[in-house]
Image: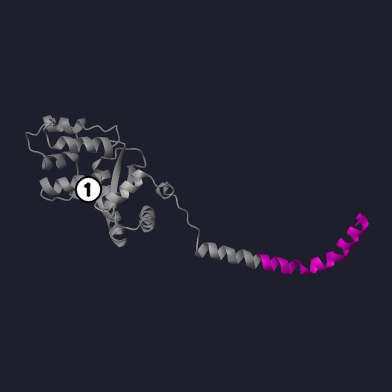
Amino acid sequence: MDKAGLEERLAMAAPQFERSAPLIVAVFTLLTLILATNLYVSPPTFQTDLNDFSPDTDASEAHDRIHVHFPNEMRPLFVHVEMDDGSNVLALEALQAMNDDLAHFQNESEKRENMIHVWTTAPGILQLALDEEGGGAPLASFNSWSSVIDVLFDEDETCGLTANDQLLSAATYASSALLHNDLNYEPVCVYLDDNTGTGAPSASSTMWVLEVNPELEETHRRMLQDQLRDV
């Protein structure tokens, strides 16, 4: 077909295409809306757990055999907490605010099948100490770290920890895993020694460790965790 013939055929088809243009636009618009609705109603899912892609090995088969005799392990959810202005996250006011946040998240967890079984948090640990050693006084009732220390410790208490001290392992865990490495507890020691200073420890951040119910189905657990992150 020569060039002139092709141009003539295109010229003859142009009016027909022009008349069909609205119909073509309408069809493709409708098709786009149908596809978009399908994506909204049933969005695609992506599997990102590396365990689902790992090949079967002797180790994985051994794990499956052992797993029959032992319960599922807790799935930790880590929350890094710091102040918006970078100030002391262990200031009493900050801990009291965190305690309110903790109550909020515990309430949200209850709404989601009690998904969190273990809460390891700075305000929770301090409140537990007050429950056991401070007559159950709520953290919100204190206005200074010195008053907290007065309730928790005897007058002759010292700041030293020995290898046989039951507090040593707990203190080591708290300082290495739950608090930033810039933790400074010297003011606590000073206050215990001579009742001077504020007694307030300091750190730039703390870690919450929330252990999720291991019996939850994997996909459902991830969905609940995503929901808890957004509340």
Residue sitting nearer the eye, 38 or 55: 55
Q: Which residue is mark 1?
A: 124
Instruction: Give how far across and how far down residue 145 sits, in percent.
Output: 19, 40
Q: Residue at x 80, y 66 (%)?
A: 18
Q: Residue at x 24, y 32 (%)?
A: 184
Q: Residue at x 16, y 42 (%)?
A: 148
Q: Residues within 10 Å of mark 1 (few under 14, many from 20)?
A: some
Residue sitting nearer the eye, 21 or 150: 21
Magenta-highlighted residues = 1-28
Magenta stretch encompasses residue 59? no
Residue sitting nearer the eye, 99 or 93: 99
What predominant SS class does the magenta segment belong to? helix
Q: Is residue 19 left or right of residue 126?
A: right
**Residue 97 seen in the current view:** no
The answer to which image quadrant residue 152 occupies is top left
Mark 1: which secondary structure?
helix
Q: Is residue 214 left or right of residue 14?
A: left
Instruction: Give how far across and how far down residue 150 sits, in percent.
Output: 12, 40
Q: Is residue 17 above or below residue 213?
A: below
Q: Residue at x 47, y 54 (%)?
A: 46
Q: Is residue 141 left or right of residue 228?
A: left
**Residue 191 seen in the current view:** yes
Q: How is the image coloured?
A: one colour
How many marks are shown on the rendered structure? 1
Instruction: Give how far across and how far down residue 188 sits, in percent.
Output: 18, 34
Residue sitting nearer the eye, 32 or 64: 64
Query: Type of residue at label 1?
Result: Gly
The C terminus lies in which quarter of the figure?
Answer: bottom left
